[in-house]
């Protein structure tokens, strides 16, 4: 669908360099990264707002590098939405079709479809977009883009200014629309949760370079390096050394400065004797219910821990544990936390399943 090869774009002192990517037809594709990573610069280059200093952009195999956005059969929802305050809601939605010279009959048909699709019945006759709520403005901006029947819809953090509950609801609606229409979506965000909610695949962009491309699960559980792991908040991360393979198919890992040995799934990247960083997501640090004996046959990587503190964060409880000098964060569902109350100073067993450990190369 969309292919970029060897893209390099300079913007002042910033350089987006040697970008290669392929976006599939009907895919929800996210460009994720921290502020200043070059996300919007890349999107604007794929969209045609900016020309690359080097490299090519292809759409369905056709070189579109030098074509303006209007000639690419694409649509764009910018961060500020760019609605026209002097036009009515109806005129805003039809603006692109008016420029294209589409017949009034076809415009009416397309508008009717957008009104039904995005549930705009109550606001379509409003005289000004200034009277709309934040969520209503988002829907009008989406309608204005989708009414063009684009091959690709580009979005640059258009939900950023909305409150959390409204943003999540609109994101879910966009995901439903994208799937039902078979739309190819390219979306910029700095928020991993947003990408994980909507994306089929994600690229992580940092300092003008693509660090990793993959599904949300691949990025979350198997970050390719420490930079990606840090950005995606892999909280439990400890230095260690690879040991030998065990008879039951696991790999021993000895934690540095700790009398702790963990079992991991074997990795060809890390032979015996190599230094390694061992990571575990908080939800993968599983606390055994107090008063229940641990199952030493099934529950690998068992550790006796002391509860240091805990705090409720909406739908989960974050529990800080200490195993010797090792500090671990564990997440429990609120239901589990209520059924098995913890107290500071209490000793509990916890375990980490070998396949949930993430192994990373140490970086100097």
Image (spheres, rainbow, N blue to C red):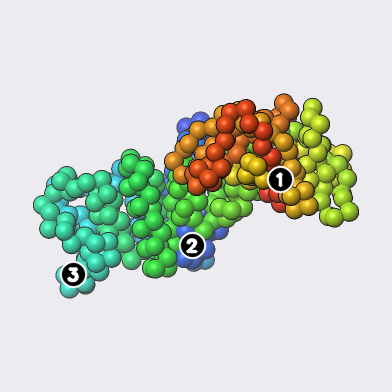
Q: Is 31 or 12 nearer to us in this picture?
A: 31
Local packing at callout 2 (Cα closer than 10 Å; few below 14, some 14-19, many 20+) is some
Disc 1 to disc 2, C-alpha distance: 47 Å
Left or right of 71? Residue 134 is: left
Disc 1, disc 2: CB below 8 Å? no
Of the 4 image quadrants, the one containing the C terminus is top right
Left or right of 349? Residue 69 is: left
Q: What residue is shown with label 1?
A: 293
Local packing at callout 1 (Cα closer than 10 Å; few below 14, some 14-19, many 20+) is few
Q: What residue is shown with label 3?
A: 108
Q: What residue is shown with label 2?
A: 27
Picture coordinates of residue 258, whole percent (x, y): 79, 29
Picture coordinates of residue 188, whole percent (x, y): 44, 47
- Please tell me the numbered disc located at residue 48: none
| SS class, disc 1 | loop
Picture coordinates of residue 209, whole percent (x, y): 58, 42
Residue 176: image quadrant is: bottom left
Tell me what residue is drawn at x 45 percent, y 48 percent: 194
Q: Is 73 or 275 nearer to us in this picture?
A: 275
- The answer to whether residue 100 is seen in the rendering is no
Q: Is 140 or 220 nearer to us in this picture?
A: 220
**Residue found farthest to the front:** 291
Q: Is 285 or 140 nearer to us in this picture?
A: 285
| SS class, disc 3 | helix
């Amino acid at each position: 669908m969309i292919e970029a090869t060897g893209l390099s774009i300079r913007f002042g002192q910033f350089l987006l360099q040697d970008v290669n990517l392929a976006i599939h037809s009907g895919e929800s594709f996210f460009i994720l990264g921290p502020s200043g990573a070059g996300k919007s610069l890349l999107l604007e280059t794929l969209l045609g707002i900016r020309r690359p200093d080097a490299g090519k952009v292809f759409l369905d195999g056709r070189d579109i590098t030098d074509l303006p956005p209007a000639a690419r059969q694409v649509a764009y929802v910018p961060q500020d939405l760019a609605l026209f305050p002097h036009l009515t809601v109806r005129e805003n939605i039809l603006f692109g079709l008016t420029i294209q010279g589409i017949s009034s009959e076809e415009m009416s048909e397309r508008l009717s479809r957008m009104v039904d699709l995005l549930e705009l019945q109550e606001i379509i006759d409003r005289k000004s977009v200034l009277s709309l709520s934040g969520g209503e403005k988002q829907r009008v901006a989406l309608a204005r883009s989708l009414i063009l029947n684009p091959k690709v819809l580009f979005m640059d953090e258009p939900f950023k200014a909305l409150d959390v509950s409204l943003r999540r609801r609109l994101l879910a609606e966009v995901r439903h629309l994208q799937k039902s229409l078979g739309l190819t979506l390219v979306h910029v965000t700095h928020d991993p949760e947003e990408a994980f909610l909507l994306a089929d695949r994600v690229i992580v962009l940092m300092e003008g370079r693509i660090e990793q491309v993959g599904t949300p699960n691949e990025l979350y559980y198997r970050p390719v390096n420490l930079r990606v792991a840090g950005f995606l908040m892999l909280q439990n991360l400890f230095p260690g050394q690879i040991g030998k393979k065990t008879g039951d198919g696991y790999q021993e890992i000895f934690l540095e400065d700790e009398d702790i040995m963990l079992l991991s799934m074997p990795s060809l990247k890390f032979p015996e004797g190599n230094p390694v960083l061992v990571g575990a997501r908080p939800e993968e640090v599983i606390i055994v219910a107090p008063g229940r004996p641990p199952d030493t046959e099934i529950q690998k990587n068992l550790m006796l821990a002391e509860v240091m503190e805990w705090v409720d964060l909406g739908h989960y409880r974050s529990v800080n544990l200490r195993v010797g000098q090792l500090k671990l964060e564990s997440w429990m569902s609120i239901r589990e936390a209520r059924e098995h109350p913890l107290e500071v100073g209490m000793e509990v067993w916890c375990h980490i399943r070998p396949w949930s450990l993430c192994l990373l190369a140490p970086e100097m």
